[in-house]
Structure formats: C-alpha cells, structure tokens
Amino acid sequence: MMGCKMFELLFWVSSVLCFACSARGFKPADNYLIDCGSPNNNTIGGRVFMADEFASKFLSAPQGVVGNTSKSITSSAVSRLYETARIFTGVSEYTFSISQGGRHWIRLYFYPFVYASYDLRLARFDVSTENHVLLSSLSVGAPLVKEFSVNVTTNSLTITFTPSENSFAFINALEVVSAPDRLILDDARTVKPSMGFQGLMWQALETVARVNMGGPMVSFDNDTLSRTWVPDQSFLIEKNLASSVSNIRSVKYVDGGSTPEIAPASVYGTCTKMNSLGDPNSNFNVTWEFNVDPGFHYLVRFHFCDIVSYSLNQLYFNVFIDSSMVVRDLDLSTYLVNVLAAAYYMDYVTDSAVTNKLRVSIGPSDLHDVYPDAILNGLEIMKLNNSYGSLTGSGTASTSRSSSKKKVGAIVSVSVGVAFGVLLAGVLFMFWRQRRQLACRRESKTWVPFSTNGGTSHTMGSKYSKGTTASLNSNTGYHIPFLAVQEATKNFDESWVIGIGGFGKVYKGELNDGTKVAVKRGNPRSQQGLAEFQTEIEMLSQFRHRHLVSLIGYCDEKNEMILIYEYMENGTLKSHLYGSGYPSLSWKQRLEICIGAARGLHYLHTGYAKAVIHRDVKSANILLDENLMAKVADFGLSKTGPEIDQSHVSTAVKGSFGYLDPEYFRRQQLTEKSDVYSFGVVLFEVLCARPVIDPTLQREMVNLAEWAMKWQKRGQLVQIIDPNLKGNIKPDSLRKFGETAEKCLADFGVDRPSMGDVLWNLEYALQLQEAVVQGDPEDNSMNMIGDLSPQINDFSQLDPTVSSARFELSSVDDLSGASMSKVFSQLVKSEGR
Ligand SMILES: *[C@@H]1O[C@H](CO)[C@@H](O)[C@H](O)[C@H]1NC(C)=O
Ligand SMILES: *[C@@H]1O[C@H](CO)[C@@H](O)[C@H](O)[C@H]1NC(C)=O
Ligand SMILES: *[C@@H]1O[C@H](CO)[C@@H](O)[C@H](O)[C@H]1NC(C)=O
Ligand SMILES: *[C@@H]1O[C@H](CO)[C@@H](O)[C@H](O)[C@H]1NC(C)=O
Ligand SMILES: *[C@@H]1O[C@H](CO)[C@@H](O)[C@H](O)[C@H]1NC(C)=O
Ligand SMILES: *[C@@H]1O[C@H](CO)[C@@H](O)[C@H](O)[C@H]1NC(C)=O
C-alpha cells in the first residue's frame, strides 16, 4: 500500500506490544494479585491471588491486623477472596515496583464483615495513589469492587490507605495489573461541541459501568483482560422498546477496528437493538441510564458490531449522549474495509456532568429508505479525575495527602492564537484517526523520515505552544522541515510539476525513505490562501477515511504554505474521462470509482455530529490510487455544516463552474445537498466523458448538467453516453445511474437524496451491471429510487448502430476545473491537486 512505510514511522504508540503480532492473549508485565489476610494462595479463574504473607513485602509499616469471617460466603466466584481482609488502623501503603510503565489497573475488593471488635461496615477511609485520590471517606455497606486505571510513569506505584479520624480502613483483595497500551488511547471526541479531545493518557479513570448489551454477564474469567461485563437490562429505561440479538460467531476483528483485548467477541457478538416489531415507521430511541457524580467528565466508549445486517450499508442510526447527538446516520460499514460485523469502538468525553444521571440512547436515522433500526453491542463509562487529580467529589488539593506531591501544570492551557489553536487541535487529532484507521502499524517512538540533518528544531511545540505538555511536543511529526520538502521535490523542479491549481503548483516528490508524495505549494501567503491552507489541514486531520486523500504533513516555515499528501498514482478522475489519452475506463470501473467517492462524501457529511460540506466536488478533486480506488481531495473550501437545529450555513458562494448548485447560488445557503448536486454533475460527466462546460459546443450542449438532464427526462440518456461505453452498459444499470444523477440535480436541495442514498443507488447500479440472472422480483425490493420498469435484459437500446449525438472532444480549456474565487482573475486549468 502506498504511503504505508511512512505511516509506520508515524505511529508513535509507545508500547512494544502489538496485538496483531502477539498470537494469543495479553501477558501483563506487572501482575500483582493479593488475597489480603489470606493464609493461602487462592486461584480464581486461573489467576493466583497470593497469600497475605507473600504480600507483606509490599506493605510498608502495616498498622493493623488480619481479619477473617467465620460465615461462609457463597455469593460469587470471588467469594474466597472475601473471606479474609487486612484491617488498617493507621496510614498504610502498598508499594509495587513497576517493570513497565503505562496504564495499570487497580482493582479493590471490599466485603464488610465483623471480625473481633472490627465491624468493617463502620470503617471510613481514603485510598489514593501518588498522583490521584481514588476513594475518599469511603464506607462500605455491601460487597463492592472498584476498578481504576492509571498511567504509571515511574518505576513504582504506591497505594495508600488512610483511615479517617477515629476510624480504620480495610481491603479484602487487591490487584495491580498492566493493561495493554492500546486500550485507552490519548484521544477521543468531545460531545459538545464535537471536536478532538486529547490528554486521556494523563487521566486516572474509574470504571462506572461496563455493559454487555443484549447478552449475559461476561465474567472476569471469560474476558480477555479479566474484566467483568454486566448485562444491560437493569440500565434500560423502557425494556419493551429493546430486543436482543446474539451472533457471536460472526464477529470479525479487522485492522483499524477494535481488538479482542478492547472487548471480547462475547461482547461484540450480542447487541440490544430497537424492537421495531417490523413496523417501518418506528421512531423511538432505546435509552440506558447510569448513575454518575455531577462535576466530573466521563469517557463513554461505545462498542459496535453490525451483527444484524445482511449486507453492508444497510444499517444507519443515530447515537446520543444525554440530549446531544454524537453520531448522525452512523453507518458502521463506512468505518472499516467493507467488512460486515467488524468490531469497532468510539470514545467520547462528556461535558462535566450537571446531574447525577447519564443517559445513552440510540435511535433510527431519519434517512428515508432506511429501515428504522439501531444497535449497541457494548458500553463502557469511565470517570475522569477532576482538576485536583481526584476521582471523588470532595477530594480537593487540601484534603488529599498525596495531591500536594502532585506535579503542577500537567496540562497548561494553550495560549496561542485561535487559528493556530484550531490548527494544532486538528493536527493532534489526526494522530487519533490515524492510529485507529490505518492498516499498517508498527510502533515507533519518534517520527524520523527525514534522517536528521539536525534541522528539525522548528516544531509545533516550540512554535505554537510554549510550555505545553510533552504530549503536545511529542506530536511534532506532522510538521515537515522545508529542507526535506526541497529535497523531496529536487528543489521544486519544474519538470516534477503534476498539476496547477488556484492554490498553487503541485509537485511529485519522493521522501528520502522512498515514499512518493504529492507536494502542494501555496502561492506566497495571502489571507485567502492562508485560510484555505488551515482549513485543509484541519479538515484532513479530522477526517480519515480510505476514500479521502490523506495528509502526510505540512510545512509553514519561511512563509511557505506547503501540504504533503499521499501520492495518487493515477491522478484525477477527470483525466481518465477525457483529454489525457488514458485508456477508457470500463463501466464497472467507473461505477466503483463513483461509489468510492460517494463513500468519502457520505463520510464527510455524516461521520460526525456536524456535517462537513466539501463545496468543491468535481472530477478533478476525485483522485485515483494505483488500484483506481477513488479518494476525495481538496478540502480547502470545506465548511462545517449547519448545526443540527439549523438548516443551512450562509456563506459567500464558492465552488467550480458547471458543478455549482443553483440553489446555493441563488440563496447563498449551503447544505450537504450542494455537494449532492455537484456529485450529480460528476455522475453525468463520468457517463458522458465530456467537460461539464464546453463553450465550443452548440449552445444547448455547453452545460453538461442541462444537456444530460434533457436527455434523461426524455428517457434517452443512452443517446449521449461515452461512445466507449456503448453496448457495455446493461440498461437497468444505466437507468438506475441516470435516475440517481437526475435526483441529485433536483432544483431544490430538499428533493435531492442524501449522499447515503446516492451510495446505495450506485451500489445497486453496480449490482444490476454485474447480475447474471436478472428479473428476479426480489431485486425490486432493493430499489431505492423509483421503480424498475419490467423491460429487463432489453439490449436493443444499446445497439451500437443506433445513431447518437457525438461530441468533438476538442482540447480547449474548459472552465470546469477553476474555482470561482479565482476564475475572475485568471482562467486556470486546474487539476485540483
Ligand atoms: C503462593 O504465591 C507466592 C507468590 O506468587 C509464591 O511465591 C508461592 O510459591 C505460592 N505458594 C504456593 C503454595 O503455591
Ligand atoms: C480466622 O483467624 C483466626 C485467627 O487468626 C484463626 O484461628 C481462624 O481459624 C480463622 N478462621 C477462619 C474461618 O479462617
Ligand atoms: C503514559 O504517559 C506517558 C507520558 O508520561 C506516555 O508517553 C504514555 O504513552 C502513556 N501511556 C498510556 C498507555 O497512556
Ligand atoms: C464462559 O463462557 C462459556 C461460553 O459462553 C460459558 O459456558 C461459561 O459458563 C462461561 N464461564 C463463566 C464463568 O461465566
Ligand atoms: C432520541 O433522543 C434524542 C436525545 O434525547 C432526542 O433529541 C430525539 O428526539 C429522540 N428521538 C426520538 C425519536 O425520540
Ligand atoms: C486529572 O489529573 C491529571 C494529573 O494527573 C491532570 O493533568 C488532569 O488535568 C486531570 N483531569 C481533569 C479532567 O482535570
């Protein structure tokens, strides 16, 4: 895969553990299991909890006694751990040496019983680590297991039990166990506004809920990492609205998705879904409710795996946290490489909770033509420590013994200009997308594609964020030194130019590790150019998708505005359609390219709560890789779409002639449907293989959109298709394609289909082209726009002898490539990259 080597280098995940490589299970480097107070080692679920005597070496100056209960406890598998306890009458510490830094679980087991003069229900105490208060003024009335995780960066971890005045502390069992580094990444999304969150690595987390949706309890001895997953029934608000599905064998783990360590197949293989009882008009949410503490942020991890669909792109649904929509029209098949039932997860960090309830809901998409359904396979909710480093309400700096030692300023607010703040956030967030979504991964602590020269002193950290954390500084990878860019392009050798656009020239280049890149060098800094430069970095870094072109880096040294992308071997879609002498693409290839581009755009429109509108969809902005896979490029004009409660964004009209949505032009109001219009024009362009504006033609033919619509409305589209396609398109496929393009070009945005609908229809057109046996009435049920008329297999229309309007494909400049913003000052022939 192109650019793979580069990305390998980009991965800076610090662990040397690789799930993909480690054949079987995760082996924790540190694994301390203590059955406190017990005279014997106890083996529970294959794990040996050591007897108290072996644990005494970890316990400094123990003050207190070992206690036991005479009552036999039979409630659960861990009951043997509960039979004994260590009781502390003074401050006591367990100190464990940590052989490998990183996230560690701390699990504390409490079971209150009465031993001699100690009634454990009366105990009251704090538990803390060096940096975090885990529990304060805890008293335990019923059996309790608390799970925390902290990133240990020193070579030891101390857990301190501090009895409250005149009271005592106790513990029945204790675990300190390494967790895989990949389990909690540094990044997530925030709920409101939807943007990148960064800094999870510094957080102490407390597990609030870990739920196996629609399935039984998965106990610690059946979990890959000794966690317990509880069933969701008790959290469901209206149980009758939900039903469960189980299909554990269908679960697939693929690169870029989840791993068995993140959650086992027994979790992904069951789900709770909308109980729509076959009613296609069902419209309700399935909601779960959890108890939380006000004032804290929570990490909400959704586990998804589409075990209910029969094919890709069948299931679309919305996901909410409290009243905020976090994902609209979630289509699980767009996230992973065309694999049904692939395990996937998403992390969101909530606002500071205002009430003591947190609700999570799933509900049907409002895309028409989609059967209302929604699923959730698993859910984890973890509390983040507050700014005092505490996980408990009252754990302020003054009450916490340990917080006085707390390092100050772990995260300092970034005092930089807003523009660069956004830029920075974007670039940082890009790491998250990348670590998740790229197939080729290898750990490497630093990014060193530009072998030294020592010239890498200019970093994001030093330039934009003096005094910020190491976590920011460590992400300097995306900045590429000017020297390296010069080297890669043979000092911007004119013979390496592969395109010229409004933004500037595009050069082919080769980094010194051999990675081929496309280098887009902006014209000397103008305000307009700078804005587009930043937009592009921001957009590309947020949106990582196999059908969106990837950004490899950028350079802003010496007033330069340079963007470095993955190199797309086969150039633009446009060049394959006309004017460049490439061999003609087959109909299937064209359909696949349209489908790929539609996927990319669909992702832009729906990948996050706020839609992103591309604004410059055209064949010159659809690039093809070495396998002719389509990727949407050029985000310089992109805009974040309307808030969910608004219907449009008002903005100055930008875009390219011939592709412009007339409604947008008239009303200057931008919605996703403007992209749909432009995409419709691209569809006709693909079908007819001619420029969208060709001034050399007769007047009624100049504008492709108008011309093609005329023929489409007459049902005679076949008359104007690319002569190379004649006889090679099945009529049904052509009809479906024509109808889809026609719908896209509807005068009013509301009448146009969504990108998701377009995608379905194109896939259907491909199926119709590929289908061997046709005329199966079942096929009609998949028909998304209009009906299939019955004359299937009628090839008479495609008789190549039927005369058709022919085009002189002259080599005149066409206007279609030029962005509106530039077209008045110069007529440029743009290849968009
Ligand atoms: C109990 O566990 C300790 C610590 O893991 C170990 O050293 C000891 O040999 C074990 N004893 C028995 C009887 O298994
Ligand atoms: C509880 O501890 C006492 C004193 O250490 C011991 O004599 C007794 O056998 C223990 N009881 C149980 C049930 O383990
Ligand atoms: C733990 O923190 C260090 C920085 O001190 C960081 O490099 C590392 O990636 C973090 N580990 C995890 C698993 O978050
Ligand atoms: C583990 O899973 C298997 C298969 O689902 C089940 O039969 C077994 O009872 C489970 N064990 C526990 C302890 O839950
Ligand atoms: C689902 O929940 C969200 C958030 O509370 C709400 O805005 C939406 O209207 C609900 N949808 C339905 C169909 O009840
Ligand atoms: C949690 O504690 C860390 C210090 O360990 C601090 O940097 C971070 O800001 C805290 N989290 C929140 C949400 O305040």
Image: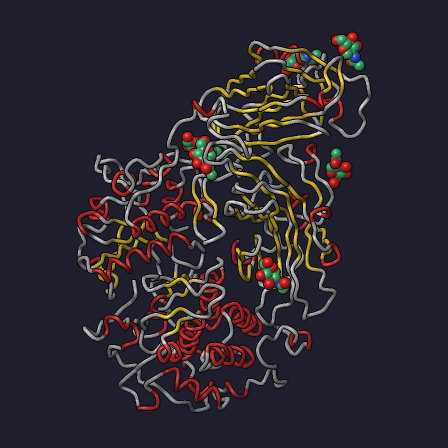
> Residue 167: percent from the left, percent from the top?
64, 18
In percent of the image, x 57 and y 15: which residue is there? 91
In percent of the image, x 24 and y 66: which residue is there? 502
Residue 474 occupies quadrant: top left
Q: Nearer the viewer, residue 519 or 541?
A: 541
Would you say 181 lies left or right of 242 here? Answer: left
Q: Nearer the viewer, residue 182 or 833?
A: 182
Q: Is the residue 637 above or below the residue 713 in the image?
A: above
> Residue 642: percent from the left, percent from the top?
44, 65
Would you say 93 lies left or right of 413 here? Answer: right
Q: In which quadrant is the C terminus drawn? A: bottom left
Q: Is the residue 428 above or below the residue 656 in the image?
A: above
Residue 86 occupies quadrant: top right
Q: Is the residue 637 above or below the residue 413 in the image?
A: below
In the picture as drawn, the residue positioned furthest to the front comes out as 166
Look at the image and tell me whether residue 202 can be seen.
Answer: no
In percent of the image, x 49 and y 62: which residue is there? 606
Give the colour scheme of this rendering.
secondary structure
Q: Nearer the viewer, residue 212 or 134?
A: 134
> Residue 81: percent from the left, percent from the top?
72, 22
Q: Is the residue 618 above or below the residue 662 in the image?
A: above
Residue 548 occupies quadrant: bottom left
Q: Quadrant of ligand 6?
A: top left
Look at the image and tell me whether residue 438 can be seen.
Answer: yes
> Residue 275: percent from the left, percent from the top?
72, 60
Q: How many marks?
A: 0
